[in-house]
Image (spheres, rainbow, N blue to C red):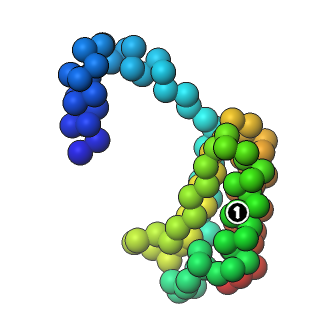
Amino acid sequence: MAALQVLEALVESGRPIEDLVAEVELYPQILINVRLDEQREIVGLPAMQAAVAAAEQELAGQGRILLRPSGTEPLIRVMVEGDDPVKVETIAQRLADLVRELI
């Protein structure tokens, strides 16, 4: 599906792919998998939601956070990306540590 959307964007813009890709800004990203003994609801807990909201404010619109259970393993996936690699690492570790506390 993604490939079809890229092709559609190329056709609609009439520009070469090099021009479109040049506009994409890549951010440092870290993914931490926190293993669970069994699948549990962690993401929806108030403490976790508050921590994610605080971390999003810390990123100030210059990144994103994805916290989700794995669909195939007993894991919580903590992904953080942003323009500052040190901040990304710090936030990801802090959220992963909180997941470990909550399990």
Name the quadrant of the C terminus: bottom right
Q: Nearer the viewer, residue 10 or 39?
A: 10
- How many residues crowd around disc 1 within 10 Å: few (fewer than 14), some, or many (20 or more)? few
Residue 72 position (above or below residue 5): below
- Type of amino acid under label 1: Ala
Q: Residue at x 63, y 38 (%)?
A: 28
Dot 1 falls on a residue whose secondary structure is helix
Residue 36 position (above or below residue 7): below
Name the quadrant of the N terminus: top left
In-image side of 26 versus 85 (left or right): left
Q: Which residue was labeled with disc 1? A: 53
Residue 66 percent coordinates (x, y): 56, 58
Number of numbered callouts drawn: 1
Q: Nearer the viewer, residue 73 or 65?
A: 65
Q: Residue at x 37, y 14 (%)?
A: 18
Residue 39 percent coordinates (x, y): 51, 83
In-image side of 7 versus 35 (left or right): left
Q: Nearer the viewer, residue 64 or 96?
A: 64
Residue located farthest toward the front when viewing the structure as drawn: 12
Q: Quadrant of residue 32?
A: bottom right
Does the rendering let one see residue 1? yes
Residue 79 position (above or below residue 8): below
Q: Residue at x 61, y 55 (%)?
A: 65
Residue 101 position (above or below residue 8): below
In-image side of 76 versus 86 (left or right): left
Does the rendering let one see residue 100? no
Q: Nearer the viewer, residue 31 or 50?
A: 50
Q: Quadrant of residue 84?
A: top right
Q: Residue at x 55, y 28 (%)?
A: 25
Residue 63 percent coordinates (x, y): 64, 44
